[in-house]
Amino acid sequence: MGLAQIGIPGLILIIFLALIIFGPRRLPEIGKAAGQTLREFKSTTNDLISDDDDKIDKKDKNNNKALDD
């Protein structure tokens, strides 16, 4: 059972518990911090993937050169 299978009732329960624990004043701050963290994680992940793709492309070019010679 993964996170994608929570459903609407589960999300409502999580939001309700978050309101009780953190209160309505701190909840926007926590949401903003979580959003920034996810954005930074996604950006870093994309950078790592593109770096790996660049390395693979470079190796392919070198291998093709060696085969042509």
Image: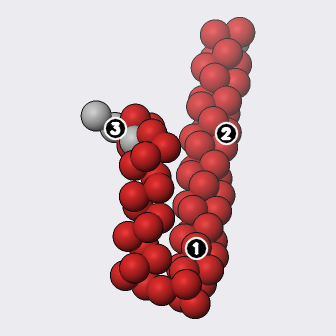
Q: At numbered mark 1, what does the secondary structure look like: helix, strand or loop?
A: helix
The residue drawn where x is 67% and y is 15% is 64
* Residue 58: quadrant of the picture: top right
Query: How many marks do you count on the picture?
Result: 3
Q: At numbered mark 3, what does the secondary structure look like: helix, strand or loop?
A: loop
From mark 3 to mark 2, how far is it between C-alphas? Answer: 33 Å
Name the amino acid, label 3.
Gly
Q: Residues within 10 Å of mark 3 (few under 14, many from 20)?
A: few
Q: Mark 3 points at which residue?
A: 2
Residue 31, disc: 1
Q: Is residue 46 above or below residue 68?
A: below
Q: Are marks 2 and 1 in contact (CB under 8 Å)?
A: no
Q: At numbered mark 2, what does the secondary structure look like: helix, strand or loop?
A: helix
Q: In this view, does 27 lie above or below 12?
A: below
Q: In this view, does 18 lie above or below 21?
A: above
Q: Quadrant of the N terminus?
A: top left
Q: Name the residue under label 2.
A: 54
Tell me residue 49's x, y (percent): 59, 43
Observer-nearest residue: 3 or 50? 3
Observer-nearest residue: 51 or 62? 51
Name the amino acid, label 2.
Asp
The residue drawn where x is 67% and y is 39% is 54
Observer-nearest residue: 67 or 10? 10
Tell me residue 12's x, y (percent): 47, 55
Point out the tag, 1 or 3, that comes first from the N-terminus: 3
* Residue 16: quadrant of the picture: bottom left
